[in-house]
Amino acid sequence: ALAPAPAPAAPVRPADPKADAKTQDVLSYLALVPERRTQRILYGQYAASEACCSAQEKGRRGFEVNVESVEKETGRTPAIIGIDYNEWDFAQKTLVRDYDELNRLAIPYANGGSLIAVGYHAANPWTGGYWSSGGCPGAFGDLVDPSKPVHTAWRKQIEKVADGLAQLQRAKATVLWRPFLEMNADAKWWWQVCRPTPAEFRAVWKDMFDYFTVERGLHNLLWVYAAVTQVGSNRPALELYPGRDVVDVAGYDTYHDYPEWPDYPAWKRLGKVLAYTERGPHATDGRSRVYADLLDGVEKHGWDISYFQAWGGSSRPAENPGGLDMLKDPRVAEQA
């Protein structure tokens, strides 16, 4: 089991005031992980998507390739299991619109003590296309305007998501819920095409927050704001931050071959748990030391990072030099 964290000087309050006791305890635990001398960062491993991009990321096969292989290689189970409610096949009309299979694969890990991290690559509600498809004939704020047709399409989509998260709640699984991930990256319709203002982004995030927590009674969620570090045409990472009242964890998806955290002091001032919400090498040629250098880099810079989620396939720690040694390092918390 994970080593216990020290008792907090004061309770860490979840954004959801009705968060269940387990979820409150998990947030307090995450907040104090970086203060420990050993097991001071949690290892998460992306497992699978409902419908994604390659055979190695789908359902049962994804768990075999990305998680079960880690257990065989190290004899240990990741502290965080990552799944994605991905709408990749939506445009081809082949998507099974529920998350039952993916949840059934994840729930045994939750029962065994792992946290479940759920990302959401939402389908484009205007076009019916997948998450990277273009088309945004209105404003981003139209998603929460009942007078707009897109509001109905969007609500139907997140109703199914809420159904999936409710299944995890019934299984007593605390979820690191990561919507609108990489919201500053050009690859996603929620930024690439719609270009929301900060006020619009907060309104849509807050509407989802209220719908899930108040209307649907989902109190097992820790809300994760996750930007991306890549530079170029991306928006400043914190420009769309929706506010401390609706966020529990803040972090970066980063795919570089060295430890990085742009503008760390600004992130630290948020007063939130910080995490590498996705982590992997820039080049997937099996030669990156991204994991071998991760722990020393975090310590060198004094970054308080509670967990990292390694991506799958060729981004797995086992596929890159020093990755398996890192997983056995006493500074890394995995489940026994």
Image: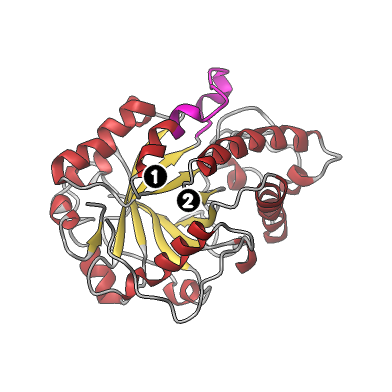
10 Å crowding of disc 1: few (<14), some (14-19), many (20+): many
Residue 25 image offset from top left, x and y in percent: 46, 63
- Numbered label tally: 2
Q: Nearest the camera: 166 or 299?
A: 166
- 1 to 274, vertically: above or below: above
Residue type at mark 1 is Ala
Q: Magenta span covers which residues?
A: 86-103
Residue type at mark 2 is Thr
Residue 123 image offset from top left, x and y in percent: 59, 33
- The residue lying at 40 percent from left, 37 percent from top is 106
Disc 2 and disc 1 in contact, CB within 8 angstroms:
yes
Question: What residue sits right under mark 1 in the picture?
Answer: 110
- The residue lying at 54 percent from left, 22 percent from top is 95
Residue 263 image offset from top left, x and y in percent: 44, 72
Q: Is residue 323 magenta?
A: no
Q: CA distance from mark 2 to mark 1?
A: 8 Å
